[in-house]
Image: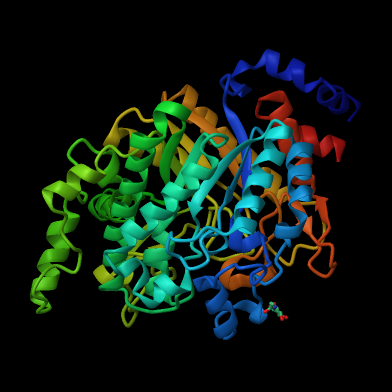
Amino acid sequence: MAYLKLVLVVSITELVRADPSLKFPPGFKFGTATSAYQIEGAWNVSDKGESVWDRFTHARSDVIHNGHTGDVACDSYHQWKKDVQIAAELGLHHYRFSISWTRLLPSGISNYVSEDGNKYYSDLIDGLLEKGIEPMVTIFHWDLPQRLQDLGGWTNPLISDWFADYARIVYSLYADRVKFWITINEPLIFCDFAYNSGKMAPGTIDPYVATYLCSKHVLLAHAKAWRIYDEEFKLRFHGKVSIANQLIWYEEISPADKETVEFLNQLSTGIYSHPIYSEKGGWPPGIEEIIAEKSKKEGYPRSRLPAFSNEEINLIRGTYDFYALNYYTSRVVRPLKDGEIAGPWPIFGSLEFGIATDTLPEWGKSQIDVFVTFPAGLRHMMSWLKNNYGDIQIFITENGYPNREEKELHDIDRIQFIHDHLEQVLLSIHEDNIDVIGYTVWSLMDNLEWFEGYSVKFGLYKVDFEDPQRSRSPRKSAEYYRKVIVNHALVPVKYLYDEL
Ligand SMILES: *[C@@H]1O[C@H](CO)[C@@H](O)[C@H](O)[C@H]1NC(C)=O
């Protein structure tokens, strides 16, 4: 054992010098992420308007764990200085947060900007920059103004202009200080999962029509917002703008799966990527035809997946500066069993196409069933993106590990998760020549995990939700991530075990 000890006390610096493959490229950015509704609280202070998540948590305690709400959450509206403080403790290069649409524009429409809302985000951005942390701002992270929802929300085509107007205001207030922008976060969740499950605001279940209307309008909204930046702000401020997609990797386990797996990758990743990143633009190959055909058989006068006009295809195509990728989990496919109408996570395929998705027993478990871990899926996903869309820069804008009711701070499983995913990132960079430029842990701290309430913890920092001050305490994973950042290298986990 003395020998083992000796090996492990080699400093990380020496370790990395001996093995340069542990090193991240110069300029590679490490950060963490949060979103407004999940952390801010203060849902009704000043002139803030009601969002769909305010309405949903207040009205649908039957869906939400223990009737939890984001009314107070981490109280970041009042305690944002603590967030900046812990971000600085971690040594983050960037901190990704979102703007609450109704805090900035209480009525949802851009005729009036809240002075208090503006001041809150302006102060937060300044506070981060003072600590040398780059703000990465998500303009929309699911908390749509309730007023716009009452007008149909993402199923109303006018939403793309309402969103673009809102985005222009956000840029005009903060583009002098913010260089990384995410227009919209994870349409796969707020279009597909939401309208398939009813577990997310607005709570409507309408998988066959609303889902596809939402998908189309999201792409138009993103494209308009990207072009506004490109035409009105880019020359002065030189920032980068993209949409963030949650990508679920479908892994082929037998040659018989090949077609179905590719179909699902096109359906879930391609649907929000092909229109933007492919040379041709428009819906991904194979998808448009099959939904049009089904719709016709079902007696619809036109496809449930609304077509793009040539003008819309050109509007959307090329509206990116990098690929913003959120990755948590992977799936394999299997046929539905007798009597089964949907697989365990009916985002895609199972309801509409009779395909069940599943996981493999050898993949890593977490305490949340859907978040089965398969780190190699991240690498496979990035290669798939490169094969489909060419050499685009990839910024990993979310990756993280959940636990349920995690009271203690000794989160070795989260450290292993981060290590194993960063290892795949390095393989992508070094072996597959993929230009990955950053990595972002979800999340800086525990927060309201949507319909799971506060029962699911993703934080590098624990938040004490019983404490009116909402104190933040570092878990061991925070210490690990700090070491990764300061060494700019993949710190072996056993190295940390020795110190713990
Ligand atoms: C704001 O909401 C809280 C519940 O979260 C309620 O107790 C309080 O009265 C509300 N304040 C105003 C000004 O409506």
For residue 153, what is the image quadrant? bottom left
Q: Position of residue 129 (x, y in %)?
A: 68, 34
Q: Report the front residue among 448 and 54.
A: 54
In the image, residue 27 above or below residue 211:
above
Q: Position of residue 195 (x, y in %)?
A: 37, 72
Determine whether, in the image, residue 250 is placed left or right of residue 407: left
State which quarter of the image contains the C terminus: top right
Determine whether, in the image, residue 291 is placed left or right of residue 223: left
Describe the colour scheme in one phrase: rainbow
Residue at 70% x, 59% y is 77
Residue at 56% x, 66% y is 369
For residue 155, what is the image quadrant? bottom left
Q: Is residue 168 visible?
A: yes
Question: Ligand 1 is in which quadrant of the figure?
Answer: bottom right
Figure label count: 0
Determine whether, in the image, residue 467 is placed left or right of residue 70: right
State which quarter of the image contains the N terminus: top right
Q: Position of residue 111 (x, y in %)?
A: 44, 61
In the image, residue 209 above or below residue 249:
below
Q: Report the front residue among 316 and 116.
A: 116
Determine whether, in the image, residue 260 is placed left or right of residue 125: left
In the image, residue 152 above or below residue 469:
below
For residue 432, what is the image quadrant? top left
Q: Report the front residue among 9 and 454.
A: 454
Q: Position of residue 434 (x, y in %)?
A: 42, 27
Residue at 52% x, 34% y is 179
